[in-house]
């Protein structure tokens, strides 16, 4: 049934959009992937321009394949979305305590997350790739861990990888830090922070060494922060509106029914467990 949920919610909309015309965001990611591929093929290291670009770096190999690179990039992102969707289903089944409720909730949210106005033609950004380490970290947290468990280092490392793939996920890293501190204590939070810090710093050093220049990377993010600061009101409005519209309209009233019913059943199960 997990395969069926992923097929309907994730694979189908991406197959439908596979041959669509290029979109702006995927064009930017494809450009950096092509630039990275050409630079590495000429033994010039990583380009000393742009941002961290970890996802374009991981996908740059598709430019060595025959055919249209955009199609390969969309297929690669679809594989990432399938893996992320499978992890999400497992998380929801575990959290809800019911396979039926978990899969209904997964179907509702995965359909909203894979709407065409959200993913464009299937390769819009690194969000689904970043979901993979983030959801893996959450899966580890679902195990009965002690505060002194070394698994917290892995949780931090996976969360750091998610942030490096998609920088705005830093908010999830901070949320995870406080959640672990309150739920498992300072020792667990400290291990989480150390694991994340060491992983993030190690990958950052490797990327900077490949670029040969740290100043251009810092300059890029300083300029980017100024752009986002000027557009902060619009970004917040679009975030709220797009989220609500996706949940409401992906299959109309059926989507709201699935979500409402799933939350109701989960709440009843939690109440019975506490009793």
Image (cartoon, rainbow, N blue to C red):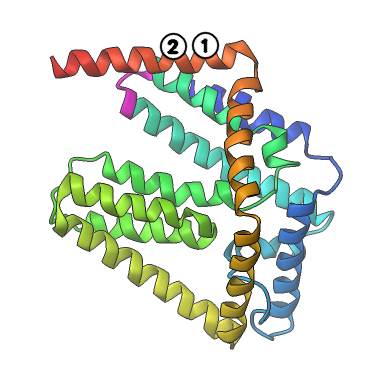
Q: Does residue 122 show up?
A: yes
Question: Residue 5 occupies which quadrant of the picture?
Answer: top right
Q: Is residue 83 above or below residue 1?
A: below
Q: Position of residue 66 (x, y in %)?
A: 82, 58
Number of numbered discs on residues? 2
- Element marked by disc 2: helix
| Residue in the picture at 56% in, 22% down | 4
Please rate how many residues cluster around mark 1, counting C-alpha atoms within 10 Å: few if below 14, some from 14 to 19, many from 20. Answer: few
Magenta span covers which residues? Answer: 95-99
The reply to whether the magenta stretch includes residue 192 is no
> Left or right: where does residue 160 sit relative to residue 41?
left
Q: Main secondary structure of the magenta part?
A: helix
Is 66 situated left or right of 112 in this image?
right
Badge 2 crowding class, 10 Å Cα cut-off, few under 14, some 14 to 19, many 20 or more, is some
**SS class, disc 1:** helix
* Picture residue at 53% right of the left edge, 28% below the top: 109
In terms of depth relative to the viewer, which is nearer, 269 or 58? 269
Q: As rendered, which of 235 and 63 lies closer to the eye?
A: 235
Residue plotted at (18% across, 56% down): 188
Work out how far the residue at label 2 is from the one at label 1, CA to CA, in angstroms: 6 Å
Which picture quadrant has residue 50? Answer: bottom right
Residue at the far right: name it. 21
Q: If the image is split into quadrants, where does the C terminus sit?
A: top left
Q: Which residue lies under the disc numbered 2?
A: 261
* Place of residue 72 in the rendered image (x, y in percent of width and height, measured from the top left): 74, 51
Mark 2 in CB contact with mark 1 (< 8 angstroms):
yes
Relative to 10, residue 212 above or below:
below
What residue is shown with label 1?
Answer: 257
């Amino acid at each position: 049934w997990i395969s069926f949920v992923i097929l309907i919610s994730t694979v189908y909309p991406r197959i439908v959009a596979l041959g669509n015309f290029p979109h702006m965001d995927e064009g930017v990611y494809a450009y950096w992937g092509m630039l990275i591929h050409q630079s590495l093929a000429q033994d010039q290291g990583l380009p000393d321009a742009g941002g961290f670009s970890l996802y374009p770096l991981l996908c740059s190999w598709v430019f060595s394949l025959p055919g249209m690179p955009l199609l390969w990039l969309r297929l690669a992102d679809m594989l990432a979305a399938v893996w992320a969707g499978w992890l999400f289903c497992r998380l929801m089944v575990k959290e809800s305590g019911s396979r039926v409720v978990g899969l209904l909730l997964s179907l509702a949210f995965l359909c909203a997350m894979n709407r065409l106005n959200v993913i464009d033609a299937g390769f819009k950004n690194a969000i689904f790739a970043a979901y993979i380490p983030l959801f893996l970290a959450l899966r580890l947290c679902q195990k009965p861990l002690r505060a002194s468990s070394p698994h917290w280092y892995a949780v931090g490392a996976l969360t750091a990888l998610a942030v490096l793939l998609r920088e705005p996920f830093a908010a999830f890293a901070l949320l995870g830090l406080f959640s672990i501190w309150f739920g498992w204590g300072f020792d667990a939070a400290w291990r989480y922070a150390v694991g994340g810090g060491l992983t993030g710093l190690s990958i950052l050093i490797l990327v900077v060494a490949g670029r040969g220049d740290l100043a251009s990377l810092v300059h890029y993010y300083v300029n980017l922060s100024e752009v986002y600061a000027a557009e902060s009101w619009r970004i917040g409005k679009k975030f709220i509106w797009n989220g609500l519209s996706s949940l409401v309209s992906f299959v109309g009233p059926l989507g709201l029914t699935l979500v409402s019913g799933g939350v109701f059943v989960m709440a009843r199960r939690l109440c019975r467990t506490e009793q």
